[in-house]
Image (cartoon, grey):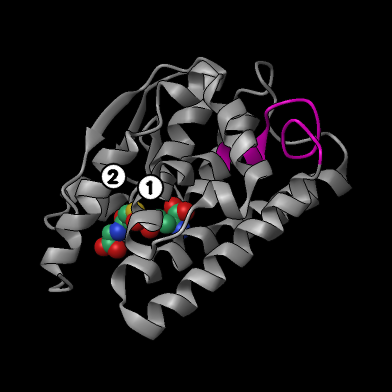
Amino acid sequence: MAGKILLLNMWASPFGMRVIIALDEKGVKYEYKEENLREKSPLLLKSNPVYKKIPVLIHNEKPVCESLIIVQYIDEVWPEKSPLLPKHPYERAQSRFWAGFSDKIYENGTRIWRNKGEAREEAKKDFINCLKLLEGELGDETYFGGHTFGFVDVVVIPFASWFYAYETHGNFSVEKECPRLMAWVKRCMERESVSKNLQDPKKVYEFVCELRKQFGIE
Ligand code: GS8
């Protein structure tokens, strides 16, 4: 089942990177439309009228919204190549739990670069705690849940392209705080679907600096 696939996205979005990595893992070809989030296209507003956010995957004219739902949709529509969710219901439930939890990386990371002083220190604590919980779940496995690259890996790895921005604005080191998680990042980067599609951390950092200026934080 292929048909027409169009992805509405904004390049720096870790949520969009989740979808791109999943499509790449499945070898699915798609069209790409970059959105200007300050002037959203009528197609985006029509496709995601509830949240008005990217990413949106439009498959045969039908929109699917929310990155976690999109990645699971991709896995169900193209199940043969690189299955992402585990087979067992309990393991699937666990994967969905940690995938949902990982959104906190972004929430806490945003609090790091949007704030100063005490509020930034609080955010940093929450951010590191969140990474440590994920690191605990990873344990000594190669990937989340075992030996194969799967759903939680696809969902969490895009945040690594934002680490440099969080570290620089928060003055800390993810490597120092969570060495096993960073080793996992490096393993994931050996996969083409990841190395090819993760944005350059320096570019993301510059993007964040721009946002800080716009919000009058500098
Ligand atoms: C989050 C998407 C999102 O935050 C998902 O897809 O998983 N829960 C959603 N998208 C942002 C860009 S990335 O920060 C977005 O589209 N923002 C536009 C806006 O809020 O107006």
The answer to whether one can see residue 50 in this image is no
- Decide if residue 89 is on the left or right side of residue 202: right
Q: Does the magenta stretch include residue 46?
A: no
Which tag, 2 or 1, sits closer to the chain's start? 1
Tell me which residue sits at (56%, 29%) in the image: 186
- Residue 135 picture location, percent across and down: 70, 50
Q: Mark 1 falls on what kind of element?
A: helix
Vertical comparison of 204 with 23: above or below: below
Q: Name the residue beneath numbered marker 1.
A: 164
Q: Residue 204 carries which label?
A: 2
Q: Quadrant of residue 211?
A: bottom left
Give the extent of the magenta segment: 140-155
- Residue 48 picture location, percent across and down: 34, 55
Is mark 2 in CB contact (under 8 Å) with mark 1? yes
Q: Mark 2 falls on what kind of element?
A: helix
Q: Nearer the viewer, mark 2 or mark 1?
A: 1
- The three-letter amino acid code for the residue at tag 2 is Val
Q: Looking at this view, is 152 or 59 the one in front?
A: 152
